[in-house]
């Protein structure tokens, strides 16, 4: 199959780039399976296993038609096209909705968790997978040498709730927290200033893959008290890969990802704190193997291929166009 992957970003990702990492892993796995992939991406993108076509100022449908192929997979928008755009594109298409969006959703939209799909009135989803060969090998020999917990997300996003993670660890007798993904003072999403944390909390800013692996190999667990409906949660699967449990709120996809064997769910800081005291009761090997087996790029690619084949054969992925609702509400997190 000849597949166009459309992404509004530079590939590969260097620092944060969660969506870009997923798209990259998907394309590599499709090529491994014998398919041809072309990226339509921003200037500066490079790839040694697939062709890259740089996006320009022409309408997107026109650029897609100029490449040609069997199907186009978009990683932006809501999967809605006018009749004129469909005619210009000349290819069947699917669209992965990676975030929480509002408004009408196309009939061939794909979401990234069951909860994510259901909240948008749809039924088709594919869990994000990663190419674990790109990650450092975890230390599964136990928890000796693990001295701190970590928070992994864009700290400037209030719904990610870095302050909640600080509040949880503040009450622990030996609680130390490394914040990966932001600084105390941030102007990128409006003025953000985190209340001065205790000395046991350190901010490391945006980290690249090597730095992230270094920090996660020494962590006792992920504290992830988000205050919104999390669409998926790559921070969860990346942390599990390194053999550590996850302590998070029960919102969005998180009850699907965090089963009792690998972590705990609660919207209460005090309850999460109690569970953190038992961090070394979890098995590093079980956490690692759970992420390795369920959230890898091969499983993801196989599920996307099933979607491609259905749409290429004239089928649709959802019952019809649907509407998102209540996607950006702030959810509670209390002591």
Image (cartoon, grey):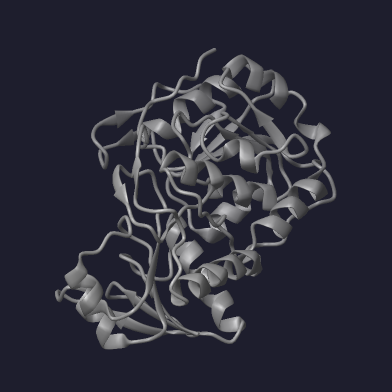
Classify residue 236 by image quadrant.
top right
Q: Residue furthest right?
A: 141
Q: Residue 208 in the image: state x and y as whole percent.
A: 48, 58
Q: Nearer the viewer, residue 55 or 189?
A: 55
Can residue 231 be spotted in the picture?
A: no
Q: Nearer the viewer, residue 81 or 28?
A: 81
Q: Residue 65 in the image: state x and y as whole percent.
A: 26, 83
Q: Residue furthest top?
A: 335
Vertical side of 222 occupied by 249: above or below: above
Q: Residue 234 in the image: state x and y as whole percent.
A: 54, 50
- Residue shown at 81% from the left, 50% from the top: 285
- Is 204 placed left or right of 157 in the picture? right
- Residue shown at 49% from the left, 24% from the top: 164
Classify residue 258 by image quadrant.
top right
Classify residue 19 by image quadrant.
bottom left
Quadrant housing the C terminus: top right
């Amino acid at each position: 199959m000849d597949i166009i992957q459309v992404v509004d970003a530079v590939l590969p990702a260097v620092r944060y780039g969660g969506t870009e990492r997923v798209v990259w892993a998907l394309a590599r796995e499709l090529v491994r399976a014998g398919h041809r992939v072309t990226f339509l991406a921003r200037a500066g993108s490079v790839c040694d296993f697939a062709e890259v076509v740089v996006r320009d100022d022409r309408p997107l449908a026109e650029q897609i038609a100029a490449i040609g192929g069997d199907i186009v997979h978009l990683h932006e928008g809501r999967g809605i096209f006018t009749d004129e755009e469909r005619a210009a594109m000349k290819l069947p298409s699917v669209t992965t909705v990676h975030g929480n969006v509002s408004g009408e959703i196309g009939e061939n939209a794909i979401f990234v968790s069951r909860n994510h799909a259901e909240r948008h009135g749809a039924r088709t989803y594919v869990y994000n997978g990663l190419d674990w060969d790109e990650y450092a090998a975890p230390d599964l020999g136990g928890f000796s040498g693990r001295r701190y917990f970590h928070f992994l997300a864009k700290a400037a996003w209030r719904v990610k709730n870095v302050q909640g993670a600080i509040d949880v660890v503040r009450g622990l007798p030996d609680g130390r927290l490394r914040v990966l993904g932001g600084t105390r003072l941030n102007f990128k999403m409006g003025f953000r200033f985190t209340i001065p944390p205790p000395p046991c909390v350190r901010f490391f800013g945006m980290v690249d893959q090597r730095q992230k692996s270094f920090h996660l190999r020494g962590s006792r667990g992920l504290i992830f008290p988000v205050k919104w409906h999390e669409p998926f949660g790559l921070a969860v699967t990346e942390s599990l890969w390194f053999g550590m449990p996850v302590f998070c709120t029960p919102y969005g996809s998180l009850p699907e990802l965090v089963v009792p064997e690998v972590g705990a769910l609660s919207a209460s800081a005090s309850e999460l704190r109690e569970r953190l005291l038992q961090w070394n009761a979890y098995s590093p090997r079980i956490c690692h193997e759970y992420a390795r087996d369920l959230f890898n790029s091969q499983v993801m690619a196989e599920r996307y291929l099933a979607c491609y084949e259905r749409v290429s054969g004239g089928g649709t992925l959802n019952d019809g166009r649907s509407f998102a609702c209540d996607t950006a509400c702030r959810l509670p997190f209390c002591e």
